[in-house]
Amino acid sequence: MALPGLLKIGTRGSRLALVQTQTVAEALQKKHPKLKIKIQTITTSGDRLKGEAFKAQGGKGLFAKEIEEALLSGEIDCGVHSLKDLPAFLPDGLILACFPKRADPRDLFISAQYKNLETLPRGAIIGTGSPRRQAQLRSQAPHFRIETVRGNVDTRLRKLAEGKWDALVLAAAGLERLKKKTTSYQSLNPNVFVPAAGQGILTLEIKAGQEELTQLLQKALNDRETEWAARAERAFLKTIGGDCYTPLGGFCRREREEWKITGWLGLPDGKKFVCLEEKQIEEGPEALGEKLGRRLLAQGGKEILDAIVADPAR
């Protein structure tokens, strides 16, 4: 296989995105020492827009928009994304070429004073930026106050240390990749606090039809179990619909020789939710994810989605 003269990799400019992309580049060069790589930082709409402006323009898909435009124009050869930041449907002409091994998919409870969620006193304040996490916390622990947090991982940890909240809930993968150490944390049960579809997974997006580049990336980086889970979770996401403000979780994993996928969908206040599991019989990943999505919609999920869309305060 002929190596490209120069592989241009696009990424967001956040510290976490750069660390993730550097990890990808190092793995590629370990496999192909002669490969020349250029990391190109791209400021996305998601990085620029804040608050209501971010929400009005389409949410998390904005973290990929300019990277995808650079791919389609030929400015870069591939883009590195956190899979959970990608919308369910990609622009025409782009594909997800590979999926490196998944990091810890769980959410973490972090506190300077309390060992776990169970020891938090009534009325304690928990900070988190995810509508899914907020809804799941409200469903399991309605006696806590849940506040929306903004900013990167460093900012959130600093504010926690300053006493802004009693505890913080965020993705384990971000802390793992940034090599952040916390003295007191609890890994939340992913069958109860079901992670976002794609949480902990990186993916490389490229233009369709580039067979040699696809093979190069897959042979150097792809993890088959991660790819299987990613495809099942994204099929579930496509079947349910919604957007990044929909409290929705989807988590696929292999237990012994069996694949299982869990889906969670709830109202923002956590008072009503549906959580179901589906097991693989003979299906491939997409069929398994679609089957769970259809079951969840049929068993109360459709009513929850309709209620979310109808809420004027959304």
Image (spheres, helix red, strand yellow):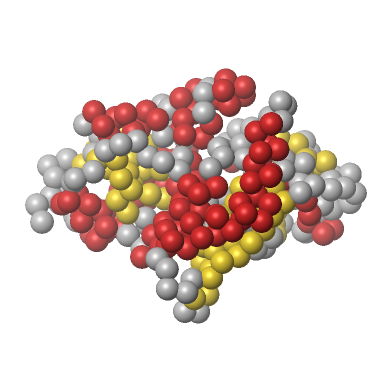
- How many discs mark residues in the rendered view? 0
**Does residue 107 sit above or below 54 in this rendering?**
below
Residue 56 in which image quadrant: top right
Residue at image location 37% in from the left, 57% down from the top: 100
Residue at image location 72% in from the left, 27% down from the top: 313
Nearer to the camera, 113 or 197 = 197
Return the x and y of residue 23 as percentages of the image width and height: 37, 50
Which quadrant: the N terminus? bottom left
Residue 105 in which image quadrant: bottom right
Q: Is residue 176 left or right of residue 163?
A: left
Residue 179 visible in the picture: no
Residue lying furthest front in this view? Answer: 298
Return the x and y of residue 64 as percentages of the image width and height: 41, 34
Residue lying furthest left in this view? Answer: 2
Q: Is residue 27 left or right of residue 269?
A: left
**Does residue 307 sit above or below 250 in this rendering?**
above
Nearer to the camera, 270 or 186 = 270
Return the x and y of residue 20 as percentages of the image width and height: 41, 47
Residue lying furthest right in this view? Answer: 122
Residue lying furthest bottom in this view? Answer: 256
Which quadrant: the C terminus? top right
**Does residue 191 sit above or below 90 in this rendering?**
below
Residue 231 visible in the picture: yes
Q: Is residue 248 left or right of residue 18?
A: right
Return the x and y of residue 58 as percentages of the image width and height: 52, 28
